[in-house]
Image (cartoon, grey):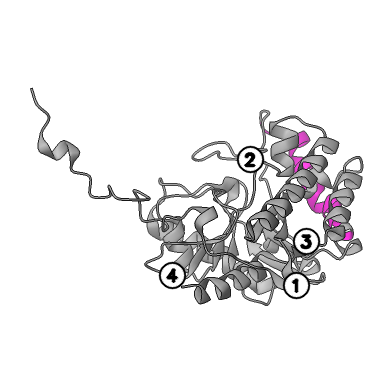
Amino acid sequence: MSLPESYLDYPLRRYGNDHSWFDWRLLRRSSPVSWPHGKAVAVWVNVSLQHYPLDQKGIPFKVPNGMTMPYPDLRHYSLRDYGNRVGVFRVADALNKFEIPSTWAINAELAVQNPWLVGHISSLKEVEIAAHGWNMDSLLHNGMSRDEEAALVQRCRSTLEEVYQPRVTGWLSPARQQSWNTLELLSEAGFEYCMDWVNDDLAYCVLPHKGNLHMMPLNTEIEDQFVMCNNLHSEDSWAQQVIDAIDFMQEEASALNQGRMLGISLHPWLVGQPHRIACLERVLQYLRSQSGVWLSTAGQILGHWQVQNSQSR
């Protein structure tokens, strides 16, 4: 019995991608990008400031790093809360010490619970605040209606903007979880970039038919919680891996004459611990010492990339 002709009827079959999320592009064949002052790599430090509810619903799944023991899991709850009470100030002090610009992805519920903390973060030098969903138990997923998800996205942005006066233009989903509607809803809500996907070393436009939303890939392989909690490597090993990545990307960018981009993801409840903060300072000091690294915020890096990308067309 032969297959029906409709079996091979695949309307998205074409050269490049078989989807319309973003245009097909090989990084090494893309137009060269140069950063200010001839720097090889643009680096932004992203700090995720999070609230893990004690009584998590776990819909559609239990969020990574959330509560693991029977309710009330006060041991793990208080460890996460440590980041917002103690660790955050150590991380902020380290960033200031080495004059590192920073992007802070903040759960909007923290702006309701602790507006002073969000206000304090926004008062730091060279800081940009991005939305990080409502809390770490409010995941975006396909079980939500489009209207329900749209309202949640907009509520996160408006809540943060009540405390942080500049416009909030960046987004990082809790657990990087999305529905099929998320990117369109972010675009409609006025966000300019999303940090969820990790499939490139430069920014790129998503939903090109809309044209105003970009992906800023935030590396997970050298993220503090991925290296230390998932891979069970030491904080010293994490610091060395970040430094190795910075070294390699500078060498690659210089050899190919193509600028690269790297996002470094931090969590105050983890690297803000007294036995780890020295490792964070080691990384930040190394970043500051590198002549080939341009340190900035995610939004500023995207803006520079957009200018060059538009000129190369």
Q: Which of the two labelled residues, at mark 2 and mark 4, occupies the earlier sequence position?
A: 2
The secondary element bearing badge 4 is classed as loop
Q: Position of residue 309 (x, y in %)?
A: 53, 70
The secondary element bearing badge 2 is classed as loop
Q: Dot 2: few (<14), some (14–19), or many (≥20) neighbours within 10 Å?
A: few
- The region drawn magenta spans 71-93
State the residue in front, 144 or 49.
49
**Disc assigned to residue 292:** 3
Q: Is residue 214 above or below residue 310?
A: above
Point 40% across, 69% down: residue: 210
Instruction: Name the residue beneath numbered marker 2.
Output: 55
The three-letter amino acid code for the residue at tag 2 is Asp
Q: Which of the two labelled residues, at mark 3 and mark 1, occupies the earlier sequence position?
A: 1
Q: Is residue 200 above or below residue 68?
A: below
The three-letter amino acid code for the residue at tag 1 is His
Of badges 3 and 2, nearer the viewer stands 3
The three-letter amino acid code for the residue at tag 4 is Gly
The secondary element bearing badge 1 is classed as helix
**Disc assigned to residue 37:** 1
Q: Dot 1: few (<14), some (14–19), or many (≥20) neighbours within 10 Å?
A: few
Instruction: Name the residue beneath numbered marker 4.
Output: 211
Point 77% across, 44% down: residue: 244
Label 3 vs label 2: CA separation? 46 Å
- Tell me if 79 is positioned left or right of 8 in this view: right
The total of numbered circles placed on residues is: 4
Q: Position of residue 97 (x, y in %)?
A: 91, 62
Residue 115 belongs to magenta span: no
